[in-house]
Image: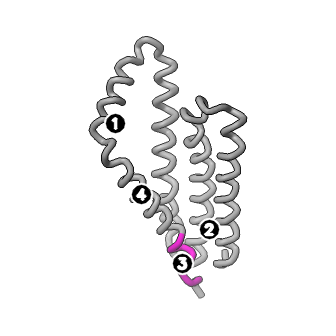
Amino acid sequence: MTRTDYLGWLGTLLLAGLMALLILRPIVGERWFGLYGLASVAIPIAIAGGLLLARRHSTIGHSPWRALLFALPLLLLAAIQIGFWTALFSLGQKGTLLIIMRAAILGASEPYLPALAAALIGFLGWLLASAARETEAR
């Protein structure tokens, strides 16, 4: 995959993710979107982005397994988000412990969440940009 092809597919992927967010939000409503929306869009973006990076890394002579560094954090965070809300709604009254645990974890980690989010965004952006900078293997 050439650099131009990679950048074209990357732009298409990012535009598709943005369009999915903009279309899903008014269709499914603010409540559902707040619970599952970002996670449900992150899963296909992580898979497609991982495949795109794997193809690009194969072209430039790197191990395609490096693409997992992009896909796994997004998939893990999306699975945690969807899993928490699914478990909470499935448990009914028994989900009180989940709410307490979530409140305790958020209470302790909330000051650090913006920095962690910025670090994750920076790391994922670096992975995408470094694949675009590398020259192809000859």
Residue position for label 3: 61
27 shown above or below 77: above
Check disc 1 and report the residue beneath it.
106
63 relative position to 29: left or right: left
- Upstream in sequence: badge 4 or badge 1: 1
**What separation in Å lies between label 4 and label 1 (alpha carbons)?**
17 Å
Q: Residues within 10 Å of mark 3 (few under 14, many from 20)?
A: few
Secondary structure at numbered mark 3? loop
Task: Specify the amino acid type for callout 1.
Answer: Leu
Q: Callout 2: 10 Å neighbours few (<14), some, many (20+)? A: some
Residue depicted at 47% across the width and 14% down the height? 92
Q: Report the mark closest to the observer, 1 or 2.
A: 1
97 with respect to 124 (left or right): left
- Marks 3 and 2, how far apart at CA: 10 Å
Report the residue marked by disc 2: 55
Q: Which residues are magenta?
A: 129-136
- Residue lying at 59% horizontally and 29% vertically, measured from the top left: 31
